[in-house]
Image: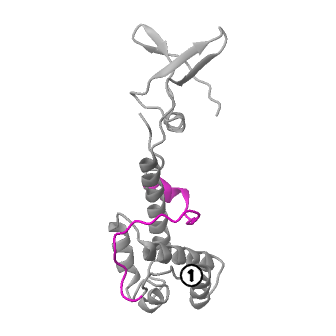
Amino acid sequence: MHFEKHLVRVGNSLGVVLDKQLLRTMGLGRKTKVRLRTDGHVIVLERAQKPKFDPGRATREAHAVRHACALDTARELFDSLSPDHMAQLGAGRMTFSMYTTVLASRATFDARWLMVIDRLDRVREAFDANRSTEEAIEEAIAAVPTVDGVESAGRLTGDVQINRPGTALRCDERAVDRAGGPTRTS
C-alpha cells in the first residue's frame, strides 16, 4: 500500500491520520502500542509487539465467513429448489425458506449441515453454468459425498461443531463484509 498524507494539527503537535483500511490491515486499534523510528528521512511505524495468535479467534472468523457465504448462497438460490430437491441434497424435506431461516439462526454446523451447505454451493455453481435443476443436484451429490456416519433422513438438526479444512464455499465480498470481515486486534 502507498498513501500520500498531509500532516494535521493535534493540539500543539502534528500528526498523520491513518485510514481504517490501513489500520485493519495492520491490526492496529486505539489501544495498540506502536514504535516509531527514523533515519532522518523515513519514519517507520510498527507494532510494539507482534499480536499473539489466537486459534479461537481464527476459528470464529472462519466460521463467520463460512456462515455469511452459506447465507449468500441461500439468498441466490431462494425458492429455486423444492422440498423434494432439498431432501435429495440431504437436508430433509423442507422448504428452502425454512432452510434459510434455520441457517440464519445457527451458531454452529454439524457434519450434515456442512455437507448440505457444500452441496448447495455446488448447485449454485451449476445454475450459474446454466444447468438444469436435476443436473445441478446430481453434480452436487457426486461432488460432495454423504459424510460417513451421518444420517441423512429427517430435517437438519444438531449443534456439534466440526471443522472440515479444505472446504471452500463460494461467496462474494459482500457476504464476507456482512460477516464483519477480519476483526481488529487492539
Q: Is residue 143 left or right of residue 155?
A: right
Type of secondary structure dominating the magenta stretch: loop
Q: Tell me what residue is drawn at x 43 percent, y 48 percent.
A: 57
Give the camera-side residue of 64 and 76.
64
From the top left corner, tell me how far across and down residue 26 is, in percent. 53, 34
Residue 121 colored in magenta in the image: no
From the top left corner, tell me how far across and down residue 12 is, in percent. 41, 7
Up-down relation of residue 24 to residue 155 (above or below): above
Up-down relation of residue 182 to residue 36 (above or below): below
Toward which corner of the image does residue 108 lie, by quadrant?
bottom left
Give the camera-side residue of 10 and 52.
52
Toward which corner of the image does residue 31 lie, by quadrant?
top left
Residue segment shown in magenta: 153-178
Mark 1 crowd level (few <14, some 14–19, many ≥20, 10 Å Cα)? few
The residue lying furthest to the front in this view is: 149
Q: Tell me what residue is drawn at x 37 percent, y 86 percent.
A: 94
Q: Is residue 55 left or right of residue 22?
A: left
From the top left corner, tell me how far across and down residue 29 is, in percent. 43, 31
Q: Tell me what residue is drawn at x 44 percent, y 59 percent.
A: 63
Residue 169 colored in magenta in the image: yes
Amino acid on which the number 1 mark rests in the picture: Pro
Give the camera-side residue of 7 and 63.
63
The residue pinned by badge 1 equals 145
